[in-house]
Amino acid sequence: MNQVIPAPVSVAPDRNGGEFRLTSQTVIQAERGAQRVGEYLAGLLRPATGYRLPVTGDRRSDGTISLALGRVDAQLGDEGYELEADRRGVEIKARTAAGLLNGVQSLRQLLPAQVESRSLARGPWTVPAGRIVDYPRFAHRGAMLDVARHFFAPDEVKRYIDQISLYKINELHLHLADDQGWRIEIKSWPRLTTYGGSTEVGGGPGGYYTQEQYRDLVSYAAARGIAVIPEIDMPGHTNAALASYAELNCDGVAPPLYTGTDVGFSSLCIDKEITYRFVGDVLRELAALTPGEYLHIGGDEAHVTTEPDYIKFFQRVLPMVEALGKKVSGWHELIKATPAVSALPQYWGTTNSNALVTDAVARGNKILLSPANKSYLDMKYDENTPLGLSWAGFIEVDDAYGWDPGTYLQGVPESSVAGVEAPLWSETLENSDHIEFMAFPRLPAIAELGWSPWSTHDWASFRSRLAAQAPRWTELGIDFYRSPQIDWP
């Protein structure tokens, strides 16, 4: 039972050994409120096993995987679960469906790797006997996918959602607009996508999500316990918008579309009233499409915007987000505009102290940690990595795993850390293979920092458990980097 990533709070293998074996007679018993989780589990297990695995509300005795909602220890919270297995069956108990989903992801990892096959495979399908009690260290455990520099089709995003859900990631931050492309349909400003979304880094065809496609992605993620946080970066990183609508430029002249990788050269026109009508329309449509609590409004690398203009801009924009019933998220530079204490600044710096962040914490903000030299999945592993960038340094698996979010930033106690996020920028990434090669095996390292108690943090244990994931990734078709730090099977 000790192979799960992220490491559970407590694992107690049965002293007498033993195991539960799935058979053609196994049923999934899901109480009211747990049926969707039951169908999700059945959908994971049916292709490889070939078993019917009916999902029923009827109580059964032996041969059952039981999903039960109800009273559990208060420390489990809304995302924790208890998993108990013996020869008669498996029971997962939780307070909420989110907790059951987390238990299901652990159950997957207790089964042989071949269970991930999408076609009939050979068993036996066994789960070791024992008990797991588990709940997250941090509430926010995120992954970010940059679909602006290179566009990724809905099925590619769904593929990444499926992969990150295995490691109990519960937030997907989509970077939907940048200098190189605008990727979300805004009905009140249609040229943002038809023109601004028509290219990408290197001059490829780009693309965008219709509002219907975006809603479908949000729903798909929610079924896997993941909330989508959409980002429209502003006032910089906006060339795709400026190219689409000349009136958003201070001189009224639209710049050409941009397919390079430089940053910091674009800005919305701070003194034009149409700028705020534009931003208001975009945020209003995005809020209506997004049931999650956050809208991410960027705020980074606005190098051609003076600090007074930057503050002036966000003093207009921050209340717009709150008026829509959403909370503000943004890169840590946003703190210069003194957002409300409900706002979530995201730290992406490469040092372990930042005065802006310390001030925000003193006012009551929580901080989301994404230090670029630890958690940016687009950084190269070493100088020979064929993909990625290296401006924040090289990040091998031990670098991604070897820091403590609870003590990393000076003046930021663990109680002020909302969680961690692993961003994946796409300047050099063009397809799912590229995403997977950069995310695996580092994403599970960041996921463990976000979920597992620090007392379980152990590099030797993690190396061993990570190596054991390789056959599972092979079954899932994940193109992972075979780090020389890990003794892959």
Image: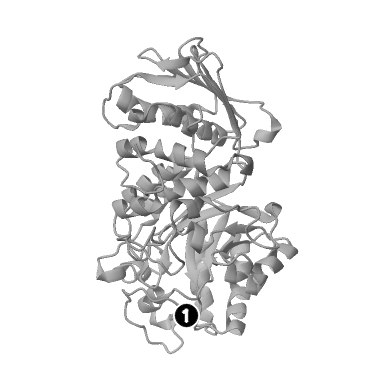
Q: Please name the colour scheme applied to the rendered image.
A: one colour
Give above or below for 446 relative to 383. above
Q: Which residue is mark 1?
A: 267
Q: Nearer the viewer, residue 313 or 417?
A: 417
Residue 99 visible to the viewer: yes
Find numbered disc 1 in the image and state the secondary structure of the residue it sits on.
loop
Task: Where is residue 189? Give x, y as percent.
Answer: 41, 69
Residue in the image at 54% along x and 61% along y: 371
The three-letter amino acid code for the residue at tag 1 is: Ser
Give above or below for 251 relative to 237. below
Residue in the image at 62% along x and 78% along y: 311
Residue in the image at 36% along x and 30% along y: 113
Name the quarter where the C terminus is drawn. top left
Task: Where is residue 330? Give x, y as percent.
Answer: 56, 65
Q: Nearer the viewer, residue 154 or 202?
A: 202
Q: Could you say which quadrant of the image residue 12 lies in? A: top right
Q: Could you say which quadrant of the image residue 477 lies in? A: top left
Residue 31 visible to the viewer: no
